[in-house]
Image (spheres, helix red, strand yellow):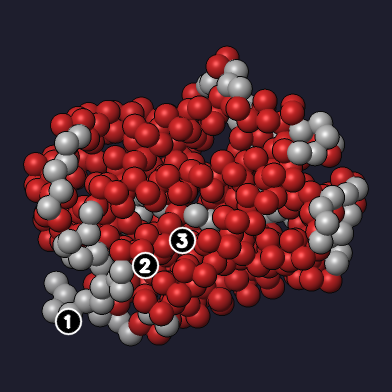
Amino acid sequence: METKTRENWSSKAGFILAAAGSAIGLGNIWKFPYSVGTNGGGAYVAVYLLFLVLIGTPLMLAAITLGRKTQLSVFGAYKSIDKRWSFVGFLAVICGFVILAFYSSVGGWVLYYFKNAVTGNLNTKDPQVLAGIFSNMMNSPATLIVYQLIFMALTMLIVINGIKKGIEVTSKVMMPGLFILLIIIAIRSVTLEGSMEGIKFLLVPDFSKITLEVAKNAMAQVFFSLSIGMGVMITYGSYLDKEVNLLSTAVSIPALDTLAALIAGFATIPAVFALGFEVGEGPGLMFITLPAVFASMPLGQIFCIAFFLMVTFAALTSSMSMLEISVSYFVDELKKDRKKSTLAVGIVIFLMGIPASLSLVQGSSFYIGSLSFFDIYDKLSSNILLTTGAFLLSIFVAWILTTKEAVKEIELSGIRFKLAPVWSFLVKYVVPVGVFIILFNSYKDFII
Ligand code: PHE
């Protein structure tokens, strides 16, 4: 139990910006567009939206409510209601380690691209040259590791400085900037000649493309993108005042997050078709396509620099929330020093991340079976750990805390929660059953 008085958000807007800051990151700008590309386009988008509404958003409300009710971070929140559930906090720490180990690798790519944007190296529309820049980076272990290290160091710096100063200030400035920029890029992308194919690919679902694999990936992406399943939203919610309207908060974060992902989709996919890139390219998609979009815009280099700078910040507001969860375990639970814990945890995550980065280099032996370490971290964190965390969250709020108690907490701010029966039904039955089916199938993948 904490005895010291806890910091609260200076305003509800501060919380929304920070929570949205955690949610909006590489998951939206880098991962969503390429996953649309590798999972069959509009059908994946449709399944994503379905899961977002039926599973992601109800869970967002559950997480924030649990946090605000207990006023404790993820470890304390579960423990204070039922001691046997303390293990969920531990799961969250492991999840933080695994996600950040590969997230920091991609964060490093973004930093490297920022540098190249500044030096003007990205100033070309030629798909081959751009693919070459990406694969050169991928085949240079030193580049991958140095930039990953810089990204981790920046994340640690922010976390050492504590929650308010670090998280709120950065989010407040960068998030609106990123939205404006993404909209401008999307407008350029959809007005390129030949972009129509891409717009159709994104919007028109071919339902025959929906497979179990697509559903699994879409659900994992919902949790990854919303930062749900490892306690970030529980912890952030614990800093909210009792007067804050949890309902509007729990709806605005997924709404903003999805808007960002969709705009990023519109910024990337139509350009892929218009400029002759490969839609199933995978993780390189944003890095090779967007520079070509910038090169076909007036003042393109300036846009390119601003874009990679803002994506860096979006990635940092996400990565610091992951690191924060793991660090707060050592600070709150094990009563360790914050600075030392951040350094220790950050260094271990960086070391874990090295094989993820190196596994990308051609001919690398950092593989288990056909999966690279990078893919293993990615799949293990989203498809298994976050999804398990989300499953446990729904069971806990529905059956241990009980939705009745949760609704009481939600109505504390004086609002009437008219949709409470619908929400309760979703959290009690639809979410756990839906998530369990997917989870069961994902476990199977890992075991076989
Ligand atoms: N939501 C973040 C993104 O989209 C990633 C993240 C996952 C952050 C889990 C915190 C916890 O980039």
In this rendering, would 90 be left or right of 110?
A: left
| Residue labelled with disc 2 | 14
> Looking at the image, can residue 394 be seen?
yes
Q: Are marks 1 and 3 in contact (CB under 8 Å)?
A: no
**Residue at image location 55% in from the left, 16% down from the top:** 207
44 relative to 158, above or below? above
Name the spot of residue 186 as percent of width and height, x first: 67, 45
| Amino acid beneath label 2 | Gly
Measured in 3D between alpha carbons, the distance from the residue under mark 2 to the one under mark 1, in whole angstroms, is: 22 Å
> What is the distance, in whole Å, between disc 1 and disc 3 at their CAs?
26 Å
Where does label 3 land, which residue?
Answer: 21
Q: Identify the mark nearer the N-term, 3 or 2.
A: 2
In this orientation, which residue lies closer to the viewer: 233 or 420?
Answer: 420
Residue at 60%, 27% in the rendered image = 203
- The local crowd at label 3, few if under 14, some if 14 to 19, many if 20 or more residues have their Cα within 10 Å, is many
How far across and how far down the image is residue 322, in percent? 43, 63
First-in-chain label (2 vs 1): 1
Q: Is residue 428 visible?
A: no
Q: Amino acid at mark 1?
A: Lys
* Residue depicted at 27% across the width and 60% down the height: 237
Q: In which quadrant of the rendered image does the N terminus lie?
A: bottom left
* Residue mark closest to the camera, 1 vs 3: 3
- Dot label at residue 4: 1
Secondary structure at numbered mark 2: helix
Q: Are marks 3 and 2 in contact (CB under 8 Å)?
A: no
Using the image as rendered, state which of residue 123 and residue 324 is in the foreground.
123
Q: Secondary structure at mark 3?
A: helix
Residue drawn 45% across the image and 54% down it: 23
Residue 118 on image: x %, y % = 79, 71
